[in-house]
Image (spheres, rainbow, N blue to C red):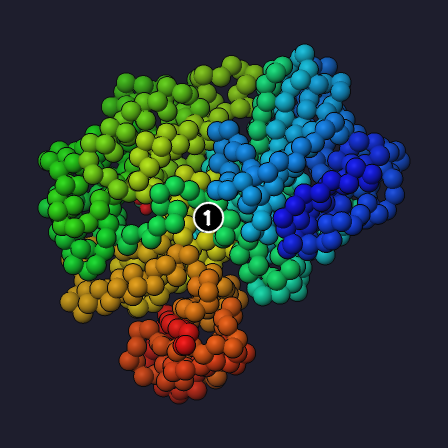
Amino acid sequence: MSITYNGVTGEFHLSNGVISYIICVYENGYAGQLYFGAALDPLGSYRHLYRSRFDGFSNSAGEFARFEYPSYGNGDFRLPAVTILQEDGSSVIEPVYRSHRIVTGKEPIPFLPATYVDEADEAETLELDLEDAKSGATITLSCTIFRDHAAVARHVRIRNGGKSTLRIKCAMSASLDLEDSGWELLTLTGAWARECGVTTRSLAQGFQGVASSRGISSHHQNPFVALKRPETGESMGEAYGFSLVYSGNFLAGCEVDAFGISRVRIGINPEGFDWELPPGAFFDTPEAVLAWSGTGLTGLSDAYHGLYRTRLARGFWRDRPRPVLLNNWEGTYFDFDEKKLLSIASSAKELGAELFVLDDGWYGKRNDDTSSLGDWIVNPEKLPEGISGLAEKVGKLGLSFGIWIEPEMISARSGLFERHPDWAIGIPGRPRTEGRQQYVLDFSRREIVDHLYEVLSGLFSGARVSYVKWDMNRCLTEPFSLSLPADRQGEFFHRYCLGVYSLYERLISAFPEILFESCAGGGGRFDPGMLFYAPQAWTSDDSDAIERLKIQWGASICYPLSSMGAHVSAVPNHQTGRMTPLATRAAVAFFGVFGYELDPAGLSDAEKSIISEQIAFYKKHRGLFQTGRFIRLKSPFDGNDVAWMVVSPDKTLAVAGAYRILARPSPGLSRLVLRGLLADASYRVAAWPAGTNDAAETNNTGLRGGDELMHAGLLFGGDRWYAPTQGDFWSRLFVLEKQE
Ligand code: GLA
């Protein structure tokens, strides 16, 4: 890994042997982009990749130029990465090269989540200073290349070195210009309970992209997009990934100009954003992580999974096996007392779970979702011995104890609202919009965050709390803060997000051994920003196994399995009404951070014994599921058959999951070709659950060569009675163990 600077041609070449990222300084001093893709010889010059000199915009000069951080209003008519309003009312800047530094390692970004290094030699960072002489604005572009990941991390700092106040109207985290538009834009889109649907569309002249203005990254659009060639698949072809390490309003999109040049930008959504920058002050954008793969979407996922699991997630739980949990939410909703919870916990222990999580409803007068958010004091009618008493008893059963909180919220019917009605976000003189019958606390205000820190640190230190589920169940409306003057209300959304990050940071510093799981009505804030504080997230409120095939498949394009909470729940499923076999529910949820979300009292003895076996199976292979290489095989967005697998780093152990959504009579033969194994090794293949003696088991178990598994594959069908015996929502796992 290296960053080389060629002073003669003005080129910076960031390379790690897998990817190269090449920036240049054009003749007029602007920062240009020459290349991002497969590694090139770091000693070569690539200045000719932009076909002529660039001395500045004139007539059509510049139309084909690629810029590292394009600015507004000076001849580049594409959408800009940066717009800065100045005292005279103009927004044009001329950001020209002033200096640069090549530093070992990677610096943190103050108050923002970001990827990091454990050892300085894992990365190198280029810091490029561009200056606009008239306004005094300095733009420092940071670009980090990682030794072990096919990705670059980008971040921008804008400093006001002038004498008058500047206003930042737009400050993207990264911008990338590509020479052609022969790409498809892949996005992860959806809604509550169906997050991360994979959508692809061909690029066309004009703007296309996704954004959030909900105050959170949202269920609807994830802060991730990819560009792929039409022929790019899971295992072959070229793809770029763009991921924003941020949890608030974002924009990620691509503009194709008249000549087919494609500009991808990702950063804070400029809509509603306006940041005042007085002389001497600086503003940091969130980090964007750009990845490139020449080996299809799997290669892209490899880059993000490795980086996000090991160098974005952090702390005590980063590398530790995550506990198998049982959460009472779908089992009881608000209707519980200590006796009921202890009976659930005691069954959970018998089944093999390691952590009992008490969800919503334990505080204030919270017997439904109309009250009490903000009153984080136990309801003595439900829990007479308090959280500490319950946690103690759960501990005596041999389980860890976890608790649900929703710190950013306030109910109109709450003691907190009676005391501090002005703490809820709203605009004086206008009604507040309710969401899930609740308001949002103004986390841009320090005193409110301080209050939550006091209350929550008291709660966590007063009881044996090992796990916290931090929920966030509505979007932000009427954006306004009483603490900001009229001309700085455009800072509200970002300051809210900084407030959330600051509370997380204080709590994880004070309680480093608590495992945090983020949640926002499921996947409403399933983003890389959250992963910096909470190494796992509740992927979706939809626990239906068939829906989860899509949700987990989509999420896995960017996010590692260790970040995805995945639970088995009761049937009929509470979100879809679907009846799926217990085996299938587990066979899907295993590919994530595994748990249960039901009341074991409703289970038969036979189901209980199946669940015990499921938990034992997951515990046996937990390292593989949580840290192995995830490979997508057959997409739930393409057909009736779905498959994926996870492989250990040394390729000696793998588990493949095969799923058939609807049964069909007289099925023909089909093959499931596996990937990522050792071609010259021999694997013992076992079906799980074993002993069904159907064709899927008898055809595929025994000794198989890695080459055979990756070319001939596993064989399905050919069994006339298959459909009636298996029914809908069939699944089977195959455990592959390399033989010596
Ligand atoms: C959200 C979460 C659920 C549950 C409820 C409790 O919807 O996503 O898992 O915690 O809130 O109110």
Vertical relation: 712 (above or below) 103: below
Q: Does the residue tagged 1 have its C-beta within 8 Å of any atom of ligand 1?
A: no
- Residue 412 visible? The answer is no
Residue shown at the point (42%, 42%) measured from the top left: 314
| Image coordinates for residue 443, horizontal then vertical, percent | 41, 26
Taking the image as four quarters, which one is ligand 1 found in? top left
Residue shown at the point (43%, 87%) measured from the top left: 718
- The residue at which mark 1 appears reads as 310
Displayed quadrant of residue 436: top left
Residue type beneath disc 1: Thr
Vertical relation: 699 (above or below) 579: below
| Image coordinates for residue 459, horizontal then vertical, percent | 23, 31
- Residue 549 visible? The answer is yes
| Image coordinates for residue 377, horizontal then vertical, percent | 21, 30
Displayed quadrant of residue 122: top right
Furthest toward the top, the residue is 163
Residue 205 shown left or right of residue 228 in the figure: right
Residue 546 shown left or right of residue 676 in the figure: left
| Image coordinates for residue 458, horizontal then vertical, percent | 24, 28
Residue shown at the point (84%, 47%) measured from the top left: 48
Displayed quadrant of residue 473: top left
Residue 18 shown left or right of residue 134 in the figure: left
Quadrant placement of the C terminus: bottom left
